[in-house]
Structure formats: C-alpha cells, structure tokens
Image: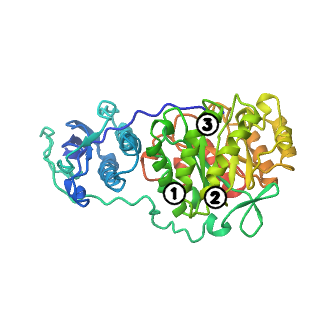
Amino acid sequence: MDRARSPRSRAGARRWQIGAVAGAAVVLVGAGLGVASAGEAGKTGSAAPTVACPQVSLGVAVPAPQRAEIERNLELLNTQIAEANKRIIDTAGQGGDQFIQNAILGPLQSRRFATIERMETAIARNAARPDLGAEKLSVCTLAEDGGGAAQPTASFSTAPSDAPPTTAPPTTAPPTTAPTATTPPAGSEAADTPVAANGQLEVCGVNLCNEAGDAVQLRGMSSHGLQFFPDCVNPGSLAAIRNDWNADFIRLSMYAQEGGLETDPEGFTAKVNGLVDEASALGLYVIVDFHVLTPGDPNQNLDLAKRFFADVTAAHADKTNVIYEIANEPNGVSWDGIKSYAEQVIPVIRKNAPDSVVLVGTRGFSSLGLTDGADETEILADPVRASNIMYTFHFYAASHGADRRTVVARAAKKLPLFVSEFGTQTFTGDGGNDFTSTDAWLDLLKANKIGYAMWSLSDGRETNSAFVQGTCAGTSFEDTGVLTESGRYIRSRILTGTGSPS
C-alpha cells in the first residue's frame, strides 16, 4: 500500500533585499550570513548554537506586480531562521546526536527551499523564471559560538535605475519570537473541539464509543512519513483540518525504518511528542502510528517499538486523546506472528496509558489477510488477548473494490475495525483518483461507524498528497486553493458527507 517516498532535498536559508529599478521592476540582492543574533542565545545563560546559512549575493529583476509577494516571502525567510534558533534553545538537551539535524535543520532546509521556489514562480508570472540557486545554497549548518550578524530586514530601496545591485550591510534587529510548539494559531481555541465533545474514547462491542457510551465515527487525516515531509504537520495545518474541514484527528506516521525512527530514536520520539502536544492543544485526537512497512514482520522491530511506546506513553500519560497504532501494515508474516508481537507491546502501552485505545495491524498490509488469501476468520478464531483494542483495515480505492467491501461489511458485525489509512488512488499512492469507489467505501464505513484516515497530509508530487506542492513551507492551509483534487475531495466528504474534487 503506501510506499516510502524520497525526502525532498530542500532549502537554502538566505537573506535578500530589494532595490528599485525604474519603477517597473526591482532587483533582488542577497546580503549577509543566515545567522541570528546572539541575543536570543544569551537568554539561556550560555552561547547556544545558531543557524548559519550560505551567503548570497545575487541580483534578479522582479516585476513590479510581484514586489509585495516577494517581500512577504523575504519576511518568511526571516521568520524561519528565527524560529529555528528559538527551537534550538527550547529543545536544548533533547534527543541524540542527530536531533538538531532531524528536528530543526532538516525542516528549515525544506521550508527555505520551498520559499525561494515560490519566489522564482512569482517572478516567472511576468518575466523569465530565474534560478536563485536554491539547490546550491540549500544546506544550513550551525554557528557553534552562538554569535554572528543578524539578518537584514527585507525592504525596497530608492536606488536609481542605472545603479548596479549592491550588497547591503547587515542590520541588527531584535530576534523574532516564534510561537511555542503548543500555542495554537490565533482564533483556534480548543473549547468546542472533538475531544471536548467526546472525551475519553473506548471500544464498546464492535464500535468506538465516547465517554457517554455513544458509538462515534472518527474522521481524519494521516501524515506521510514524518522524516519525508517534516513540515506538513504543524499548528497551522492542524488548525485547518480541525476548523476548515471539521476533522477529528491526525495520524502521525513514524516510520521505523527508511530514514525514520531507528536512525535517531530520541530525536524522532521528541518530534512525535511535540506534534502530539500541538494537536492536543487544538482539541484533536491523535493516532501515534508505529509505521511498520519494510521489513513487514513487526517482531523485527520489537525492542524499538517497546522503547518508542514506553517513551511516548510516559510523555502523554495525562492525556485522554491519544490512540496508539502498534504496527502499520504487517506483511510477509503470519497472524500468529502479529498476535505475538501485539501481546508483547500492548502491556508496555498499558503501563502508562491504561485506558487508551490500541489499534492492531492485520495480515497482508492490514487487509484482514485478504492480500494473503485469508480473511477475518483467523482473527475471530484467535483474537489478541487484550481489551480496548481495534483491528486495522487499509484500502486504496482504485485497487480495492466491491469484493473487499463485502468482507469488511461482514467482518464489521463481529470485529471492532478502524481504517487507519486509505487512499483514493491505487495502492502505490499514485495514479488517477477513483472517487466512485471511494464514495462506496466511505458510505460503507459511515453505515458501520468505522473511523478512517486518508493518506496523506503532505505536499508531494503524488496524487495522494492533500496539499499542492509548496504548501507546507508557507502559512496558509485553509480553503480549497491549497488543496489537490484528492484534498478537495476529502475536505468536502468530512464537511458535507459528499466528496467533491471541485
């Protein structure tokens, strides 16, 4: 089903200024190192490392109609560097050797590259598309002494039209204060939220029920791999799916391999914990997904899973909104092997989260065994020995049709099911969208009150991405203008009960 994607090699964090040219265009001039002032570091009492990005000195003609847009993006570059420096200070002492690279420099790289790409695109609307050198200058490092010149503030100068572009000296400005990880965007208070409405969830019979004992259907989104799209789950995108879509939850997909958790357990666990806090501040439910895909036998990751869930449940032991998915898509392994794994991991979760719902992956890429020629009867004959659990089923609508819907309809009468991942395309996550099949699937899930998450809250090139490319580097996530065809469909489906790609 979902397949690993290559991370985008993104981001040169650079400072630019704008000089006027003949009233019709302006020249973009880079200045200074991408290093924030030492004042922020001084708050900690010691010189914390700060972000340093390659120096830029370029002149590019900018059409007059695009001046305001270019200036907004320049200010965004300022903000991104300031936020990265603040996060270095706020997370001091967290994670392993690769924490800053994975949790701070990597996301900064992606944001900066996408911002400069947007600037190139903006200029190209009224002129030849420039090459601002984003790839060449994409990698930012650290200035370990905590010092360095502050970035100059983007501005329009009054240079005469025949003056050559010049590099402006850096100016000193007070550091920008970035919002903390748990601060929701303005206007997103969590008083009337999914969690406020339903409270602690539990499995009752074959349904998921709220604290009043009423069966509920949760509808939400899955992230892509957090190592592949590190910027797409943030307070802005979470507020958008809650406020603009009426979604109930976010699924956080933490790949065990493929550049994920095993490469930096402490750093990636800290990233997951931060995202759980951000979603919780907005009153959303959260599924913490231990994303097993390759290798498919979850027992090969047993120790890593135990450590991960022990750490995450300890961090959120006081929360009532977290659901734990212990194995995304087991494959190449028997039901006995999956069951053995589940019965070793669930007690680890129960130590800190005795009342949380746990989702258990099923055989054949969470197909209830259908991909392997089995079905739900093997689970019914030998269920996992644990309470308050549900079994996962995944489908991709262009590949999986009426025959599998028949099995799910039958299994739903006897097993508590949760569709923790589905797509409107083929199981590859790409190709054309099949909305007719998707409608049939989601109608079935609605009739049986089976929760679902669509793959994925990302801005990649594949059709499964809900956001258009470049969205995650910005700050606007609401309405349909930032959504792909599949994104518009799922937003409409959650809002109105009828999916519409328009």
Left or right position of 412 against 198: right
Q: What label does residue 315 carry, if any?
A: 1
Q: Earlier in the sequence, mark 3 or mark 1?
A: 3
Residue drawn at (77%, 66%), measured in percent from left and top? 214
Q: Label 2, label 1: how many angstroms apart (C-alpha)?
A: 22 Å
Left or right position of 316 against 443: left
Q: SS for tag 3? A: loop
Indicate the quadrant containing the N terminus: top left, top right, bottom left or bottom right. Answer: top right
**Mark closer to the observer (2, 1):** 1
Figure quadrant of residue 112? top left
Q: SS for tag 2? A: loop
Q: What label does residue 248 carry, if any?
A: 2
Residue drawn at (26%, 40%), measured in percent from left and top? 53
Depth order, front residue of 409/64: 409
Disc 3 marks which amino acid?
Val
Q: What label does residue 292 carry, if any?
A: 3
Q: Label 3, label 2: how many angstroms apart (C-alpha)?
A: 24 Å
Residue drawn at (54%, 61%), measured in percent from left and top? 280
Q: Which of marks 2 and 1 is nearer the N terminus?
A: 2
Figure quadrant of residue 470? top left
The correct choice, above or below, for 243 with respect to 294 in the image is below
Disc 2 marks which amino acid?
Asp
- Answer yes or no: is residue 396 visible: no
